[in-house]
Image: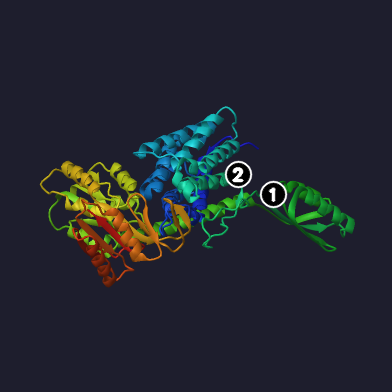
Amino acid sequence: MAVTTIDAPMLAKMFLAGAKNLEAKKEWINELNVFPVPDGDTGTNMTMTIMSAAAEVSNLGPNPDMKSLAKAISSGSLRGARGNSGVILSQLFRGFTKGISKYEQLDVVILSDALQKAVETAYKAVMKPKEGTILTVAKGGADKALELIGETEDLTVFADEVIKHADYVLSQTPEMLPVLKQAGVVDSGGQGLITILKGAYDALTGKEIDYTIEGAGTGSGVVKISQQTEQDIKFGYCTEFIIVLNRPLEEKNEFDFKAFLESIGDSIVVVADDEITKVHVHTNDPGLAIQRALTYGSLSKIKIDNMREEHQEKLIKDAQKAAAEQKAADEKRRLEQDAMVQKSQAPKKDMGFVSVSIGEGINEIFKGLGVDYIIAGGQTMNPSTEDMLNAIEEVNADNIFILPNNKNIILAANQAASLLEEKNIFVIPTKTVPQGITALINFMPDSTPQENAQRMTEELANVKSGQVTYAVRDTLIDDKSINQGDYMGIGDSSILSVGKDMDTVTKDMVAQMVDENSTIISIYYGEEVNEEDAQKLAAEVEKQYPDCEVEVHPGGQPIYYYVISVE
């Protein structure tokens, strides 16, 4: 039977199933990140974003109206958005929900229009949209939806065609971004979006899905989803009953009855004795099984379960559980961050600062430079838009500067700024911790907020940043062959050095950052590096570059052995 409309309760089920599917596959999506760093986090960021919305949807109960559902999806994802991929996903949801909120039943035309609004909203949120990303995949799906208007009214056909085309566009992303082709992966954000859509389609059509991922944890490179993981529930009703026999069931009659059941279903069990026969069958028409059984006697203990509904209820319960766990984790994290707040005892200030930080040593540096609120996060745990809003609330100032200190956090900071009207928010687009430190050093208390924002942003061009970590898989990128376990020196825009020895890799990275105009080299060593080794490295760097001043600071950051700046 064709499905021509979707109501709010069904859309809620679809959304939760999509969230669950993404949550189940987040580690696989993380491994699609181009850079083979131990904190590839697209899947995690998208999952935490959608789970924030899933928590809101779950709170609506089993029968939400479309307006409330749209608000829950939009508000929950906006405030929970983490990382660039999470922010873009939240903007897709924001545009989509604008397109559906005034309807109680959605058809092909309404859904197509909503998909157009989703893409339009997401593209507007990104200053310089890049093709070959989640945006391209979303646009491909929306374009296909537009083509299908007038061709079909069946939403299962419509959704299937949209997802197939979006999946095809995803497969072409390596042709659009050479860095993807070189690494041998598709865009991770686009894969995350397809994963959500496929989960939602499962809920619409009643498909059974196995969420296991073949090859996970084997260390053999990028894992692949099995093509056999999605299977139809061919027969939807689990039917059980007992026949109280009119007379003992003859062997031929028993054989004929089993053959009939096989013609209408599967999973057949028929156990007979002289007085009763116990029957179990999965079928799409329990009535036929019952009618045939009545020719042999009367029936008792009839039990019919809709397995598709049971499956969807399981998906919803799993998503609700995951959403509740995520909400609890977010609350715990928020309380931990509250303990890090530096609350000023002075009267309200004209200008204040919020900064993302990555380690205890870096925290102390930021505090010393006047930061009012530190958000624990950085590369290994991107803070959400909600985290930004909470931080802004804690700073008693009319004008607040946010230092994301990570290119993957800038969009979340911008999104937080767009949601506030009572304070002036200036997002300084710092992509690294050293850039954040440089921005603060160039703050002038006597200048206006606008002048400071301009000066701090302009000074970012004068600092080069590098980070040393290790590779989590084999890959080829930036014309460098990288093996799992290799040390990598990552610059502002590319991998600068690779090798088996950490000090050699670090010094090679610094060599590519220093030029004739360089005067200061700052070394921030991580939690896995002791001070003696850091000082030894600094002495060697200072000897190599006698015209530069070399500073050493305990950063305490995880994952990255060294964070180094050259100015």
Judging from the image, the colouring scheme is: rainbow
Residue 334 x %, y %: 32, 58
Relative horizontal placement of residue 231, taking residue 495 as reference (left or right): right
Q: Earlier in the sequence, mark 1 or mark 2?
A: 2
The tag on residue 235 is 1
- Amino acid at pointer 1: Phe
Is residue 44 something one can see in this rendering? yes
Q: Choose between 111 and 485: the one closer to the eye.
A: 485
Q: Choose between 438 and 124: the one closer to the eye.
A: 438
Spatial CA distance of label 1 from label 2 is: 13 Å
Residue 31 x %, y %: 47, 55
Depicted 135 relative to depicted 213: above or below? above
What residue is shown at x 52% (from left), y 35% (from top)?
A: 106
The tag on residue 205 is 2
Is residue 341 something one can see in this rendering? no
- Amino acid at pointer 2: Thr
Residue 256 x %, y %: 85, 52
Q: Secondary structure at mark 2?
A: helix
Residue 174 x %, y %: 49, 44
Depicted 394 relative to depicted 525: above or below? above
Q: Which image quarter: residue 40?
A: bottom left
Dot 2 crowding, Cα within 10 Å, few <14, some 14–19, many 20+:
some
Q: Secondary structure at mark 1?
A: loop
What residue is shown at x 51% (from left), y 58% (from top)?
A: 221
